[in-house]
Image (cartoon, grey):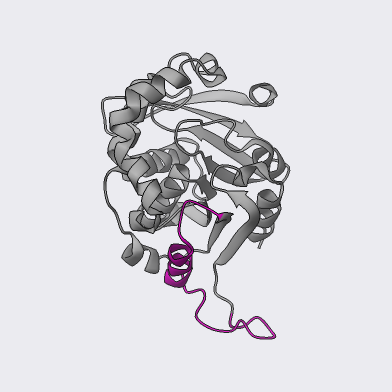
């Protein structure tokens, strides 16, 4: 709970939203985008560490945390446009962007749709296409809307619901399920990116290793030997964090260390 006391909460009116965000630390601006359901605790020690070198702008996306939902479906593209509007609101011509899971997909769409706003992007446990998830994960996506009332009832009893009393959990899970049910493949758009991209995955992630390698290849990585002098290195980077899953990846101090060196390049 200390997290909330360490930063100042602000609101920005944009795209019909009253968007909540916090500023942590100082330095180069870093827009930090959470995964689905839980906006704040998502980044835990990673946020604390990144705030020692960056001005971290931690956002609550539509319908999450302190940003109330609006009459608009959840779409990664819409959320990316919200982030472009936020950077404009903050008068930031450019920022580094880091996202986890759903937030990573938003970060990727921000880089695709508004490349001039993004200096470098870090995608944590984020695929370039839905089909790269394991079959059981896709089944979970497809069943989420039907399970929304049941899952929401369970969350209603949790500390998360106490922390964010205004969230309509049944609606959030239904909207997330509706978004996750859509197929997508962003490989062609990924190949056009000119800015440096870092991919970070767990070694037991919900995304298949074949999909992780394919994503890295679309960014120009994994094609040749980097060479003794590093001249064969791609602009992007790939990190696989050992001993982790999609759900525990950000609880390790390793992610912040890996990311910081990439962002400082």
Residue at 69% across, 84% down: 229
The reply to whether residue 64 is in sight is yes
Q: In which quadrant will I find the C terminus?
A: bottom right
The magenta region covers 204-232
Whether residue 68 is visible: no
Rendering coords of residue 111 (x, y %): 42, 55
Most frequent secondary structure within the magenta stretch: loop
If the image is split into quadrants, where does the N terminus sit?
Answer: top right
Say whether residue 230 is magenta.
yes
Q: Is 178 drawn above or below residue 224 in the view shown?
A: above
Q: Quadrant of residue 139?
A: top left
Find residue 28 and report its horizontal and vertical position in percent: 63, 48
Please state if 73 lies on the left or on the right of 122 as rendered: left
Residue at the image point whose x is 43% and y is 68% from the top: 214
Where in the figure is residue 107, as x and y percent of width and height? 45, 49
Q: Above or below — where is 161 with respect to 6? A: above
- Can you name the residue that lies furthest to the front here? 136
Q: Residue at x 57, y 64 (%)?
A: 238
Q: Quadrant of residue 54?
A: top right
Tell me how many marks there are. Answer: 0
Is residue 119 in the magenta section? no
Q: Nearer the viewer, residue 216 or 57?
A: 216
Q: What residue is rendered at 51% in x and 34% in y?
A: 59
**Can you give x and y, in whole percent of width and height, for residue 73 in the image?**
27, 33
Q: Is residue 172 above or below residue 88?
A: above
Q: 19 or 103: which is nearer to us?
A: 103
Check the image and report above or below for 15 versus 188. above
């Amino acid at each position: 709970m200390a997290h909330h006391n360490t930063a100042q909460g602000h609101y920005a009116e944009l795209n019909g939203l009253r968007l909540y965000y916090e500023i942590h630390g100082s330095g180069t601006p870093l827009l930090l985008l959470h995964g689905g359901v839980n906006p704040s605790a998502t980044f835990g020690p990673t946020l604390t560490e990144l705030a020692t070198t960056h001005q971290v702008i931690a956002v609550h996306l539509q319908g999450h945390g302190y940003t109330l939902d609006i009459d608009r479906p959840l779409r990664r593209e819409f959320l990316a446009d919200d982030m472009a509007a936020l950077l404009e609101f903050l008068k930031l011509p450019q920022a580094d962007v880091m996202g986890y899971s759903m937030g990573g997909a938003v970060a990727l769409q921000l880089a695709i749709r508004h490349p001039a706003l993004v200096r470098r992007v870090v995608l944590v446990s984020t695929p370039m296409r839905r089909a790269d998830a394991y079959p059981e994960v896709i089944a979970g996506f497809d069943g989420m809307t039907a399970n929304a009332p049941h899952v929401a009832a369970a969350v209603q009893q949790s500390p998360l619901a106490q922390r964010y009393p205004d969230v309509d959990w049944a609606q959030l899970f239904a909207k997330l399920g509706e978004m996750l049910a859509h197929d997508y493949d962003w490989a062609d758009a990924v190949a056009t990116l000119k800015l440096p991209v870092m991919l970070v995955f767990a070694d037991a992630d919900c995304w298949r290793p074949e999909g992780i390698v394919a994503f890295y290849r679309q960014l120009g990585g994994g094609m040749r030997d980097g060479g003794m002098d590093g001249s064969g290195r791609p602009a992007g980077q790939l990190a696989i964090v050992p001993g982790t899953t999609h759900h525990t990846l950000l609880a390790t101090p390793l992610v912040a260390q890996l990311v910081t060196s990439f962002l400082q390049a």
